[in-house]
Image (cartoon, rainbow, N blue to C red):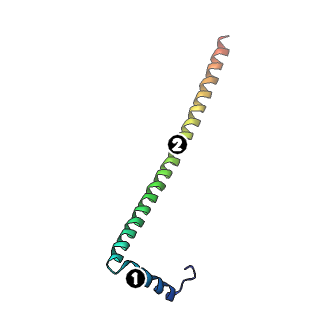
Amino acid sequence: MFGLGMPELIVIFLVILLLFGAKALPEIAKGLGQAIKTFKREAKDISHELDSDSDESKDSSVKSETKKDEQSQSDSDQQKREGESL
């Protein structure tokens, strides 16, 4: 973990304890926890939104291909009818 051992982590914790005090640490931890929770929720929402957008684009490309096929079929049918009427 970034080359930090147990003694370094203890020193860091003690410095934070001295800077913020024992009363402020739970509040800081609570705020940090809420921020992480919100970040994860928003990341999940964005992921779902991107997945649904990609699904919609796949559906629209299939629909456009189907529409093109139908158009070309109707064009060829119309040309056949015009050829028969001449």
Q: Amino acid at mark 2?
A: Asp
Please tell me which of labels 2 and 1 falls first in the chain.
1
Give the residue displayed 53% in from the left and 43% down from the top: 57
- 74 left or right, relative to 42: right
Number of numbered markers: 2
Residue 68 % position (x, y): 60, 32
Q: Residue furthest bottom?
A: 7
Q: Which mark is residue 59?
A: 2
Q: Are marks 2 and 1 in contact (CB under 8 Å)?
A: no
Q: Residue furthest front?
A: 19
The answer to which of 39 and 20 lies nearer the viewer is: 20
Give the residue displayed 37% in from the left and 66% down from the top: 34
The answer to which of 62 and 85 lies nearer the viewer is: 62
Q: Please tell me in which quadrant of the rendered image residue 80 appears.
A: top right
Residue 48 % position (x, y): 46, 54
Give the residue displayed 40% in from the left and 79% down from the top: 19
Q: Which type of secondary structure does the marked residue at label 2 adopt?
A: helix
Give the residue displayed 59% in from the left and 24% down from the top: 74
The answer to which of 51 and 1 lies nearer the viewer is: 1
Q: Which mark is residue 68?
A: none
- 16 left or right, relative to 85: left
Q: Which residue is mark 1?
A: 18
- 26 left or right, relative to 43: left
The answer to which of 5 and 70 lies nearer the viewer is: 5
Q: CA distance from mark 2 to mark 1?
A: 59 Å
Locate the C terminus by quadrant: top right
Classify 43 as above or below 78. below
Crowd band around label 1 with a 10 angstrom C-alpha radius: few (<14), some (14–19), many (20+): few
Residue 41 % position (x, y): 41, 60
Residue 43 % position (x, y): 46, 59
Classify 45 as above or below 63. below
